[in-house]
Image (cartoon, rainbow, N blue to C red):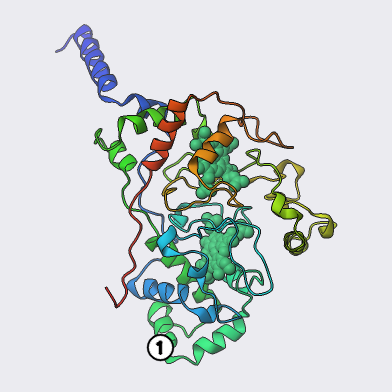
Amino acid sequence: MKSLDSISSTMQIVATLLTALSLPALADSPDIGPLPPVAANPDNLPTTARMALGQALFFDNRISGSGKLNCSSCHLPEVGWTLPSAFSVANEGFVERRNPPTLINVGYNKALIWDGRAPNLEKQAIGSTTNPVHKGQNMETLMKVFNDDPKVVALFQAAYGNKPNADDYGRALAVWQRHFLVTGQSDFDRYMEGNKLAMSESAVRGMAVFTGKGGCIACHNGPNFSDSDFHNIGLKRNPEFDKPEYRKILAFDAKRMKLEKPDEVTDDPGRYLVTKDKADWKKFKTPTLRNLADTAPYMHDGRYASLDAVIDHYDRGGDGVDNQDPRIKPLGLSAAEKADLKAFLRALWGPLPRLQTSAN
Ligand code: HEC
Ligand code: HEC
Protein backbone atom coordinates (compact mmCIF):
# COMPACT_ATOMS: atom_id res chain seq x y z
CA MET A 1 0.00 0.00 0.00
CA LYS A 2 1.31 3.46 -0.87
CA SER A 3 2.02 5.87 1.97
CA LEU A 4 0.08 9.11 2.12
CA ASP A 5 3.37 10.93 1.52
CA SER A 6 4.02 9.18 -1.74
CA ILE A 7 0.44 9.83 -2.88
CA SER A 8 0.75 13.51 -2.14
CA SER A 9 4.13 13.76 -3.86
CA THR A 10 2.70 11.98 -6.91
CA MET A 11 -0.15 14.47 -6.89
CA GLN A 12 2.33 17.31 -6.69
CA ILE A 13 4.20 15.98 -9.72
CA VAL A 14 0.90 15.67 -11.62
CA ALA A 15 -0.04 19.22 -10.64
CA THR A 16 3.34 20.55 -11.73
CA LEU A 17 3.08 18.66 -15.01
CA LEU A 18 -0.41 20.02 -15.63
CA THR A 19 0.75 23.58 -14.96
CA ALA A 20 3.68 23.11 -17.32
CA LEU A 21 1.47 21.64 -20.01
CA SER A 22 -1.38 24.11 -19.83
CA LEU A 23 -0.98 27.23 -21.93
CA PRO A 24 -0.69 30.40 -19.85
CA ALA A 25 -3.43 32.10 -21.88
CA LEU A 26 -5.75 29.09 -21.51
CA ALA A 27 -5.75 29.47 -17.76
CA ASP A 28 -6.72 33.13 -18.19
CA SER A 29 -9.43 32.50 -20.75
CA PRO A 30 -11.77 29.74 -19.65
CA ASP A 31 -14.48 31.46 -21.64
CA ILE A 32 -13.23 31.26 -25.21
CA GLY A 33 -12.61 28.10 -27.16
CA PRO A 34 -13.26 26.15 -30.34
CA LEU A 35 -16.78 26.20 -31.79
CA PRO A 36 -18.78 23.18 -30.66
CA PRO A 37 -21.38 21.75 -33.08
CA VAL A 38 -24.35 24.13 -33.29
CA ALA A 39 -27.38 23.14 -31.17
CA ALA A 40 -30.31 21.97 -33.29
CA ASN A 41 -33.90 23.10 -32.67
CA PRO A 42 -35.62 19.80 -31.73
CA ASP A 43 -38.77 21.00 -33.53
CA ASN A 44 -36.83 21.75 -36.70
CA LEU A 45 -34.11 19.15 -37.15
CA PRO A 46 -31.96 19.46 -40.26
CA THR A 47 -32.62 17.08 -43.17
CA THR A 48 -31.27 17.24 -46.71
CA ALA A 49 -34.70 18.26 -48.05
CA ARG A 50 -35.11 21.06 -45.48
CA MET A 51 -31.63 22.39 -46.19
CA ALA A 52 -32.38 22.39 -49.94
CA LEU A 53 -35.62 24.32 -49.41
CA GLY A 54 -33.95 26.84 -47.07
CA GLN A 55 -31.16 27.55 -49.54
CA ALA A 56 -33.62 27.92 -52.44
CA LEU A 57 -35.74 30.42 -50.49
CA PHE A 58 -32.72 32.45 -49.36
CA PHE A 59 -31.86 33.29 -52.97
CA ASP A 60 -35.42 33.69 -54.35
CA ASN A 61 -36.37 37.26 -55.36
CA ARG A 62 -40.06 36.47 -55.07
CA ILE A 63 -39.75 36.80 -51.27
CA SER A 64 -39.63 40.61 -51.64
CA GLY A 65 -42.60 42.79 -52.50
CA SER A 66 -40.63 44.47 -55.30
CA GLY A 67 -39.40 41.13 -56.68
CA LYS A 68 -35.90 42.59 -56.67
CA LEU A 69 -34.45 41.54 -53.33
CA ASN A 70 -33.66 38.23 -51.69
CA CYS A 71 -31.82 37.50 -48.45
CA SER A 72 -28.44 37.54 -50.18
CA SER A 73 -29.02 41.10 -51.45
CA CYS A 74 -28.05 42.29 -47.96
CA HIS A 75 -26.17 39.23 -46.70
CA LEU A 76 -23.73 38.62 -49.55
CA PRO A 77 -21.99 35.21 -49.40
CA GLU A 78 -18.70 36.48 -50.82
CA VAL A 79 -18.27 39.25 -48.22
CA GLY A 80 -18.95 37.28 -45.06
CA TRP A 81 -22.75 37.20 -45.49
CA THR A 82 -23.06 40.92 -44.78
CA LEU A 83 -22.54 44.05 -46.93
CA PRO A 84 -19.32 46.04 -47.38
CA SER A 85 -21.19 49.37 -46.92
CA ALA A 86 -21.84 51.10 -43.57
CA PHE A 87 -25.63 51.06 -43.89
CA SER A 88 -27.57 48.20 -45.43
CA VAL A 89 -29.47 48.64 -48.68
CA ALA A 90 -33.23 48.79 -48.14
CA ASN A 91 -36.54 48.17 -49.83
CA GLU A 92 -37.66 50.74 -52.42
CA GLY A 93 -38.69 54.03 -50.79
CA PHE A 94 -36.69 53.40 -47.60
CA VAL A 95 -33.15 53.75 -46.27
CA GLU A 96 -31.60 51.55 -43.56
CA ARG A 97 -29.80 53.04 -40.57
CA ARG A 98 -27.99 49.88 -39.54
CA ASN A 99 -25.34 47.52 -40.91
CA PRO A 100 -26.49 43.95 -41.67
CA PRO A 101 -24.96 41.60 -39.09
CA THR A 102 -22.99 38.74 -40.61
CA LEU A 103 -25.05 35.54 -40.80
CA ILE A 104 -21.91 33.49 -40.19
CA ASN A 105 -22.43 31.31 -37.09
CA VAL A 106 -25.82 32.95 -36.57
CA GLY A 107 -27.11 29.62 -35.17
CA TYR A 108 -24.98 30.25 -32.06
CA ASN A 109 -26.58 33.65 -31.35
CA LYS A 110 -29.17 33.87 -28.61
CA ALA A 111 -29.73 37.57 -29.33
CA LEU A 112 -30.89 38.35 -32.87
CA ILE A 113 -31.02 41.79 -34.51
CA TRP A 114 -28.80 44.57 -33.10
CA ASP A 115 -31.42 45.32 -30.43
CA GLY A 116 -32.49 41.71 -29.83
CA ARG A 117 -36.07 42.16 -31.03
CA ALA A 118 -36.30 38.77 -32.80
CA PRO A 119 -36.87 35.73 -30.57
CA ASN A 120 -35.43 33.06 -32.90
CA LEU A 121 -34.32 32.43 -36.47
CA GLU A 122 -37.68 30.86 -37.40
CA LYS A 123 -39.63 34.04 -36.52
CA GLN A 124 -36.89 36.38 -37.73
CA ALA A 125 -37.10 34.99 -41.28
CA ILE A 126 -40.80 35.87 -41.47
CA GLY A 127 -40.29 39.27 -39.79
CA SER A 128 -37.56 40.11 -42.26
CA THR A 129 -39.81 39.19 -45.19
CA THR A 130 -42.77 41.34 -44.09
CA ASN A 131 -40.72 44.27 -42.70
CA PRO A 132 -41.47 47.17 -45.08
CA VAL A 133 -37.89 48.44 -44.74
CA HIS A 134 -36.38 45.12 -45.81
CA LYS A 135 -38.62 43.20 -48.16
CA GLY A 136 -42.15 44.54 -47.63
CA GLN A 137 -43.72 41.27 -48.75
CA ASN A 138 -47.12 39.97 -47.71
CA MET A 139 -46.94 36.35 -46.50
CA GLU A 140 -50.34 35.42 -47.96
CA THR A 141 -49.42 36.78 -51.37
CA LEU A 142 -46.09 34.98 -51.23
CA MET A 143 -47.65 31.64 -50.26
CA LYS A 144 -50.12 31.95 -53.17
CA VAL A 145 -47.21 32.47 -55.54
CA PHE A 146 -45.35 29.48 -54.08
CA ASN A 147 -48.44 27.23 -54.15
CA ASP A 148 -48.75 27.99 -57.88
CA ASP A 149 -45.18 26.87 -58.53
CA PRO A 150 -44.96 23.05 -58.71
CA LYS A 151 -41.19 23.11 -58.08
CA VAL A 152 -41.59 25.02 -54.82
CA VAL A 153 -44.58 22.85 -53.79
CA ALA A 154 -42.41 19.74 -54.27
CA LEU A 155 -39.59 21.25 -52.18
CA PHE A 156 -41.98 22.10 -49.29
CA GLN A 157 -43.62 18.65 -49.47
CA ALA A 158 -40.25 16.89 -49.33
CA ALA A 159 -39.03 19.09 -46.47
CA TYR A 160 -42.04 19.30 -44.15
CA GLY A 161 -44.78 17.16 -45.73
CA ASN A 162 -46.98 20.24 -46.29
CA LYS A 163 -47.87 22.63 -49.07
CA PRO A 164 -46.07 26.01 -48.91
CA ASN A 165 -47.07 27.85 -45.71
CA ALA A 166 -45.59 30.68 -43.65
CA ASP A 167 -44.46 28.55 -40.68
CA ASP A 168 -42.49 26.09 -42.77
CA TYR A 169 -41.08 29.00 -44.78
CA GLY A 170 -39.59 30.43 -41.55
CA ARG A 171 -38.44 26.99 -40.44
CA ALA A 172 -36.65 26.21 -43.70
CA LEU A 173 -34.77 29.52 -43.75
CA ALA A 174 -33.87 29.03 -40.08
CA VAL A 175 -32.64 25.45 -40.37
CA TRP A 176 -30.48 26.28 -43.36
CA GLN A 177 -28.89 29.34 -41.73
CA ARG A 178 -28.34 27.47 -38.45
CA HIS A 179 -26.63 24.42 -39.93
CA PHE A 180 -25.02 25.69 -43.12
CA LEU A 181 -23.66 29.13 -42.20
CA VAL A 182 -20.91 27.90 -39.91
CA THR A 183 -17.23 28.80 -40.21
CA GLY A 184 -14.54 26.20 -40.57
CA GLN A 185 -11.61 25.92 -38.21
CA SER A 186 -9.60 29.06 -37.53
CA ASP A 187 -5.96 29.26 -36.43
CA PHE A 188 -7.35 30.05 -32.96
CA ASP A 189 -9.44 26.85 -32.90
CA ARG A 190 -6.42 24.75 -33.87
CA TYR A 191 -4.31 26.50 -31.25
CA MET A 192 -6.89 25.85 -28.54
CA GLU A 193 -7.05 22.21 -29.61
CA GLY A 194 -3.36 21.91 -28.81
CA ASN A 195 -1.45 22.91 -31.95
CA LYS A 196 0.70 25.62 -30.42
CA LEU A 197 2.19 26.55 -33.78
CA ALA A 198 -1.22 27.37 -35.28
CA MET A 199 -1.17 31.01 -34.10
CA SER A 200 1.71 33.43 -34.64
CA GLU A 201 3.61 34.65 -31.58
CA SER A 202 2.05 38.06 -32.09
CA ALA A 203 -1.47 36.54 -32.04
CA VAL A 204 -0.65 34.58 -28.87
CA ARG A 205 0.46 37.83 -27.19
CA GLY A 206 -2.70 39.47 -28.58
CA MET A 207 -4.81 36.80 -26.90
CA ALA A 208 -3.26 37.84 -23.58
CA VAL A 209 -4.22 41.48 -24.30
CA PHE A 210 -7.75 40.33 -25.22
CA THR A 211 -8.21 38.41 -21.97
CA GLY A 212 -6.17 40.77 -19.78
CA LYS A 213 -5.32 44.45 -20.23
CA GLY A 214 -7.84 44.96 -23.05
CA GLY A 215 -10.73 43.47 -21.06
CA CYS A 216 -12.39 42.35 -24.29
CA ILE A 217 -13.34 38.97 -22.88
CA ALA A 218 -15.79 40.60 -20.45
CA CYS A 219 -18.32 40.78 -23.31
CA HIS A 220 -16.79 38.87 -26.21
CA ASN A 221 -16.79 35.42 -24.62
CA GLY A 222 -18.01 31.91 -25.39
CA PRO A 223 -16.97 30.02 -28.51
CA ASN A 224 -18.58 32.59 -30.83
CA PHE A 225 -17.06 35.52 -28.90
CA SER A 226 -20.41 36.97 -27.84
CA ASP A 227 -22.12 36.94 -24.44
CA SER A 228 -25.48 37.32 -26.27
CA ASP A 229 -26.06 40.43 -24.16
CA PHE A 230 -26.42 44.15 -24.92
CA HIS A 231 -23.97 46.93 -24.02
CA ASN A 232 -23.37 50.61 -24.66
CA ILE A 233 -19.72 50.76 -25.70
CA GLY A 234 -19.66 54.56 -25.96
CA LEU A 235 -20.25 55.28 -29.64
CA LYS A 236 -21.17 58.93 -30.19
CA ARG A 237 -24.23 59.86 -32.24
CA ASN A 238 -23.78 59.20 -35.94
CA PRO A 239 -23.81 62.57 -37.81
CA GLU A 240 -25.56 60.87 -40.77
CA PHE A 241 -28.68 60.97 -38.61
CA ASP A 242 -28.95 64.73 -39.26
CA LYS A 243 -30.06 63.92 -42.81
CA PRO A 244 -33.85 64.00 -43.30
CA GLU A 245 -34.05 60.47 -44.77
CA TYR A 246 -32.39 59.00 -41.66
CA ARG A 247 -34.54 61.10 -39.32
CA LYS A 248 -37.50 59.63 -41.15
CA ILE A 249 -36.41 56.01 -40.75
CA LEU A 250 -35.50 56.53 -37.06
CA ALA A 251 -39.00 57.92 -36.44
CA PHE A 252 -40.60 55.19 -38.55
CA ASP A 253 -38.95 52.42 -36.54
CA ALA A 254 -39.61 54.16 -33.20
CA LYS A 255 -43.28 54.24 -34.15
CA ARG A 256 -43.27 50.54 -35.11
CA MET A 257 -41.72 49.76 -31.73
CA LYS A 258 -44.38 51.92 -30.01
CA LEU A 259 -42.05 54.51 -28.48
CA GLU A 260 -43.64 57.66 -27.09
CA LYS A 261 -43.14 60.72 -29.32
CA PRO A 262 -41.50 58.76 -32.15
CA ASP A 263 -41.07 61.89 -34.27
CA GLU A 264 -38.68 63.32 -31.69
CA VAL A 265 -36.29 60.38 -31.95
CA THR A 266 -33.02 61.64 -33.47
CA ASP A 267 -30.69 58.77 -32.62
CA ASP A 268 -30.80 54.96 -32.74
CA PRO A 269 -32.05 53.99 -29.25
CA GLY A 270 -30.80 50.37 -29.57
CA ARG A 271 -32.11 47.92 -26.96
CA TYR A 272 -34.28 50.69 -25.47
CA LEU A 273 -36.61 50.24 -28.47
CA VAL A 274 -37.46 46.77 -27.17
CA THR A 275 -37.45 47.22 -23.37
CA LYS A 276 -38.33 50.97 -23.02
CA ASP A 277 -35.94 50.87 -20.04
CA LYS A 278 -33.58 53.88 -19.73
CA ALA A 279 -30.83 51.49 -18.56
CA ASP A 280 -30.86 50.01 -22.08
CA TRP A 281 -30.34 53.31 -23.89
CA LYS A 282 -28.15 52.76 -26.95
CA LYS A 283 -27.15 49.24 -25.95
CA PHE A 284 -26.50 46.91 -28.87
CA LYS A 285 -25.85 43.21 -28.94
CA THR A 286 -22.31 41.93 -28.67
CA PRO A 287 -21.40 40.69 -32.17
CA THR A 288 -19.24 37.67 -32.95
CA LEU A 289 -15.57 38.39 -33.62
CA ARG A 290 -15.07 35.44 -35.92
CA ASN A 291 -14.25 36.23 -39.56
CA LEU A 292 -13.80 39.98 -39.01
CA ALA A 293 -11.55 40.02 -42.08
CA ASP A 294 -14.67 39.35 -44.17
CA THR A 295 -17.20 41.55 -42.39
CA ALA A 296 -15.96 45.18 -42.44
CA PRO A 297 -17.20 47.81 -41.81
CA TYR A 298 -17.84 47.36 -38.10
CA MET A 299 -20.44 48.26 -35.42
CA HIS A 300 -24.24 48.41 -35.70
CA ASP A 301 -23.95 51.39 -38.05
CA GLY A 302 -20.78 50.32 -39.85
CA ARG A 303 -18.98 53.47 -38.69
CA TYR A 304 -15.51 51.94 -38.46
CA ALA A 305 -13.92 50.81 -41.71
CA SER A 306 -10.96 49.01 -40.14
CA LEU A 307 -9.97 46.97 -37.10
CA ASP A 308 -7.42 49.68 -36.29
CA ALA A 309 -10.27 52.17 -35.89
CA VAL A 310 -12.15 49.71 -33.63
CA ILE A 311 -9.07 49.10 -31.47
CA ASP A 312 -8.46 52.87 -31.22
CA HIS A 313 -12.07 53.31 -30.07
CA TYR A 314 -11.56 50.90 -27.16
CA ASP A 315 -8.07 52.23 -26.41
CA ARG A 316 -9.34 55.79 -25.99
CA GLY A 317 -12.15 54.52 -23.73
CA GLY A 318 -14.97 55.20 -26.17
CA ASP A 319 -16.43 58.61 -26.96
CA GLY A 320 -17.75 59.27 -23.43
CA VAL A 321 -21.51 59.18 -23.97
CA ASP A 322 -24.59 58.91 -21.72
CA ASN A 323 -25.03 55.43 -20.28
CA GLN A 324 -21.60 54.23 -21.46
CA ASP A 325 -20.52 50.91 -19.91
CA PRO A 326 -17.97 51.62 -17.12
CA ARG A 327 -15.71 48.88 -18.48
CA ILE A 328 -15.12 50.96 -21.60
CA LYS A 329 -12.31 53.18 -20.28
CA PRO A 330 -8.87 54.24 -21.56
CA LEU A 331 -6.64 51.17 -21.89
CA GLY A 332 -3.22 52.68 -22.54
CA LEU A 333 -2.27 50.06 -25.12
CA SER A 334 1.16 50.41 -26.77
CA ALA A 335 1.50 50.28 -30.56
CA ALA A 336 2.90 46.75 -30.17
CA GLU A 337 -0.05 45.64 -28.01
CA LYS A 338 -2.50 47.04 -30.59
CA ALA A 339 -0.73 45.16 -33.38
CA ASP A 340 -0.80 41.95 -31.31
CA LEU A 341 -4.50 42.38 -30.51
CA LYS A 342 -5.23 42.82 -34.22
CA ALA A 343 -3.18 39.70 -35.06
CA PHE A 344 -5.27 37.76 -32.52
CA LEU A 345 -8.56 39.05 -33.99
CA ARG A 346 -7.33 38.01 -37.44
CA ALA A 347 -6.52 34.51 -36.12
CA LEU A 348 -10.27 34.03 -35.53
CA TRP A 349 -10.82 33.75 -39.28
CA GLY A 350 -12.06 30.38 -40.53
CA PRO A 351 -13.03 29.31 -44.07
CA LEU A 352 -16.56 30.34 -45.11
CA PRO A 353 -19.09 27.67 -46.08
CA ARG A 354 -19.08 27.11 -49.83
CA LEU A 355 -22.34 27.03 -51.71
CA GLN A 356 -22.94 23.94 -53.82
CA THR A 357 -24.58 25.10 -57.01
CA SER A 358 -25.18 23.21 -60.21
CA ALA A 359 -22.27 25.16 -61.71
CA ASN A 360 -19.62 23.66 -59.39
C1 HEC B 1 -32.82 44.94 -47.48
C2 HEC B 1 -31.71 44.34 -46.77
C3 HEC B 1 -31.94 43.00 -46.10
C4 HEC B 1 -32.54 41.88 -46.62
C5 HEC B 1 -33.19 41.72 -47.98
C6 HEC B 1 -32.44 40.86 -45.61
N1 HEC B 1 -31.77 41.33 -44.51
FE1 HEC B 1 -31.34 40.30 -42.84
N2 HEC B 1 -30.73 41.99 -41.96
C7 HEC B 1 -30.60 43.23 -42.57
C8 HEC B 1 -30.25 44.24 -41.57
C9 HEC B 1 -30.01 45.71 -41.84
C10 HEC B 1 -30.23 43.58 -40.33
C11 HEC B 1 -30.04 44.24 -38.97
C12 HEC B 1 -31.40 44.82 -38.61
C13 HEC B 1 -31.45 45.56 -37.30
O1 HEC B 1 -30.62 45.34 -36.42
O2 HEC B 1 -32.38 46.39 -37.16
C14 HEC B 1 -30.51 42.17 -40.61
C15 HEC B 1 -30.52 41.16 -39.64
C16 HEC B 1 -30.70 39.82 -39.91
C17 HEC B 1 -30.55 38.75 -38.95
C18 HEC B 1 -30.12 38.90 -37.50
C19 HEC B 1 -28.71 38.39 -37.34
C20 HEC B 1 -28.12 38.62 -35.98
O3 HEC B 1 -27.15 37.94 -35.65
O4 HEC B 1 -28.58 39.51 -35.26
C21 HEC B 1 -30.85 37.58 -39.59
C22 HEC B 1 -30.84 36.18 -39.01
C23 HEC B 1 -31.20 37.92 -40.95
N3 HEC B 1 -31.07 39.29 -41.11
C24 HEC B 1 -31.60 37.00 -41.90
C25 HEC B 1 -32.17 37.38 -43.11
C26 HEC B 1 -32.92 36.48 -43.96
C27 HEC B 1 -33.17 35.01 -43.67
C28 HEC B 1 -33.33 37.21 -45.02
C29 HEC B 1 -34.25 36.75 -46.16
C30 HEC B 1 -35.54 36.22 -45.72
C31 HEC B 1 -32.81 38.56 -44.83
N4 HEC B 1 -32.12 38.63 -43.65
C32 HEC B 1 -32.97 39.58 -45.74
C33 HEC B 1 -30.78 43.48 -43.90
C34 HEC B 1 -31.46 42.64 -44.76
C1 HEC C 1 -18.75 46.10 -22.39
C2 HEC C 1 -18.78 45.03 -23.38
C3 HEC C 1 -17.67 45.02 -24.42
C4 HEC C 1 -16.31 45.07 -24.24
C5 HEC C 1 -15.55 45.17 -22.94
C6 HEC C 1 -15.72 44.99 -25.57
N1 HEC C 1 -16.70 44.90 -26.51
FE1 HEC C 1 -16.40 44.83 -28.51
N2 HEC C 1 -18.39 45.06 -28.81
C7 HEC C 1 -19.36 45.08 -27.82
C8 HEC C 1 -20.62 45.47 -28.40
C9 HEC C 1 -21.94 45.60 -27.65
C10 HEC C 1 -20.39 45.73 -29.76
C11 HEC C 1 -21.40 46.26 -30.79
C12 HEC C 1 -21.55 47.74 -30.51
C13 HEC C 1 -22.40 48.51 -31.48
O1 HEC C 1 -22.41 48.22 -32.67
O2 HEC C 1 -23.05 49.46 -31.00
C14 HEC C 1 -18.98 45.43 -29.99
C15 HEC C 1 -18.34 45.49 -31.23
C16 HEC C 1 -17.04 45.08 -31.47
C17 HEC C 1 -16.45 44.91 -32.77
C18 HEC C 1 -17.17 45.11 -34.11
C19 HEC C 1 -17.66 43.78 -34.67
C20 HEC C 1 -18.58 43.92 -35.85
O3 HEC C 1 -18.75 42.93 -36.57
O4 HEC C 1 -19.15 44.99 -36.08
C21 HEC C 1 -15.17 44.51 -32.58
C22 HEC C 1 -14.13 44.18 -33.66
C23 HEC C 1 -14.95 44.46 -31.16
N3 HEC C 1 -16.10 44.81 -30.51
C24 HEC C 1 -13.75 44.10 -30.55
C25 HEC C 1 -13.51 44.30 -29.20
C26 HEC C 1 -12.19 44.31 -28.61
C27 HEC C 1 -10.90 44.06 -29.37
C28 HEC C 1 -12.36 44.60 -27.29
C29 HEC C 1 -11.29 44.79 -26.24
C30 HEC C 1 -10.34 45.87 -26.51
C31 HEC C 1 -13.78 44.74 -27.05
N4 HEC C 1 -14.43 44.56 -28.24
C32 HEC C 1 -14.35 45.01 -25.81
C33 HEC C 1 -19.14 44.82 -26.48
C34 HEC C 1 -17.89 44.92 -25.86
**Residue at x-position 24% and y-position 36%:** 195
Vertical order, 169 against 254 (above or below): below
State whether residue 282 is above or below residue 354.
above
Residue ID at (58%, 36%): 313
- Quick one: quadrant of the C terminus? bottom left
| Residue 237 image offset from top left, x and y in percent | 71, 46
Residue 232 in sight in this render = yes
Tell which of 339 and 109 is nearer to you.
Answer: 339
Q: Position of residue 23 (x, y in %)?
A: 31, 26
- The three-letter code of the residue at mark 1 reads Lys
Q: Residues within 10 Å of mark 1 (few under 14, many from 20)?
A: few
Residue 277: x and y, percent? 75, 46
**Number of numbered markers:** 1
Q: Is mark 1 within 8 Å of ligand 1?
A: no
Residue at mark 1: 151
Q: Quadrant of ligand 1?
A: bottom right
Residue found 76% across the figure and 50% down from its top? 276
Identify the residue at image location x=42%, y=47%. 290
Q: Nearer the viewer, residue 141 or 36?
A: 141
Q: Position of residue 44 (x, y in %)?
A: 44, 67
* Viewer-side residue, 162 vs 135: 135
* Image vertical order of residue 155 relative to residue 217, above or below: below
Q: Is residue 97 left or right of residue 122?
A: right
Dividing the picture into quarters, in which one does residue 11 lie? top left
The N terminus is located in which quarter? top left
Q: Is residue 42 visible?
A: no
User: SS at mark 1?
Assistant: helix
Front position in the image: 150 or 61:
61
